[in-house]
Image (cartoon, grey):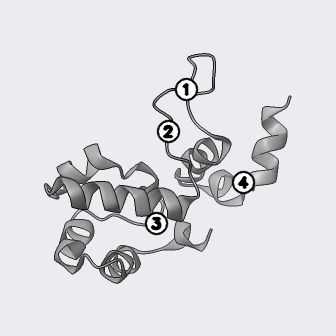
Amino acid sequence: MAFLHWSCQDVAKWIESLGYPQYTACFTENLITGKKLIYVNCHYLHRLGITDFEDMKAISSHVRELLEILEPLRSRSIADPLRDSMGLFLEKKSRTGDWADSLTYKQFLNDGKQ
C-alpha cells in the first residue's frame, strides 16, 4: 500500500499515467495525497472540478482498483456491511498520526473480531 505515502505530485503523476493529464492540476491544487485518494469518488471528483461524467466514472474505478476496494453492489442486502474490510481499513489508515501509520491490515482484522 505504498500509495498511502504518495505526495500530491505522486498522485498527479498517477492521474497522468491513467491518461488524464488535464486533471493533474485538479489534484495538486486540492492537495490530494495518497491518503486522501481513499475519499475520491464521483461526488468528490466533481468538487475537485472534474465534470465529465465518463472521466469521473473511469477515475473512480481506477481509484477503487488501486485501493483494492470492491465496487458497491446495487443489489446488496441491507443486512450486509456497508463497506468491505479493505475500504474500512483504508478509512482508518487515512487518518494522521503514529497509530494510523502503524496499523496493519492484519491488526485491523483481528481488532474487528473482538
**Between discs 4 and 1, the one toward the N terminus:** 1
The C terminus lies in quadrant: top right
In the image shown, does 31 or 109 lie closer to the viewer? 109
Label 3 secondary element: loop
Q: How far apart are marks 2 and 4 (CA)?
A: 25 Å
Mark 2 vs 3, N-terminal side: 3
Mark 3 Cα-neighbour bin, 10 Å: few <14, some 14–19, many ≥20: many
Q: Mark 4 points at which residue?
A: 103
Q: Do the residues bearing badges 2 and 4 touch, measured as CB atoms within 8 Å?
A: no
Q: How far apart are marks 1 and 2 (CA)?
A: 8 Å
- The image's mark for residue 72 is 2
| Vertical order, 103 against 23 (above or below) | above
Mark 3 belongs to which amino acid? Gly
Q: Earlier in the sequence, mark 4 or mark 3?
A: 3
Q: How far apart are marks 2 and 3 (CA)?
A: 21 Å
Residue displayed at 41% across by 57% down: 61
Spot occupied by residue 112 in the image (x, y as percentages of width and height): 78, 34
Looking at the image, is 15 positioned above or below residue 63? below
CB-based contact (under 8 Å), mark 1 and mark 2: yes
- Tag 1: Cα neighbours inside 10 Å, few (<14), some, or many (≥20)? few
SS at mark 4 in the image? loop
Amino acid under disc 2: Pro
Q: At 75% across and 45% down in the image, what residue appears?
A: 108
Residue that badge 1 annotates: 76
Residue that numbered label 3 is attached to: 34
Q: Quadrant of residue 109?
A: top right
Q: Which mark is residue 33?
A: none
Relative placement, left or right, of 108 versus 57 is right
Q: Earlier in the sequence, mark 3 or mark 1?
A: 3
Residue drawn at x 19%, y 50% is: 46
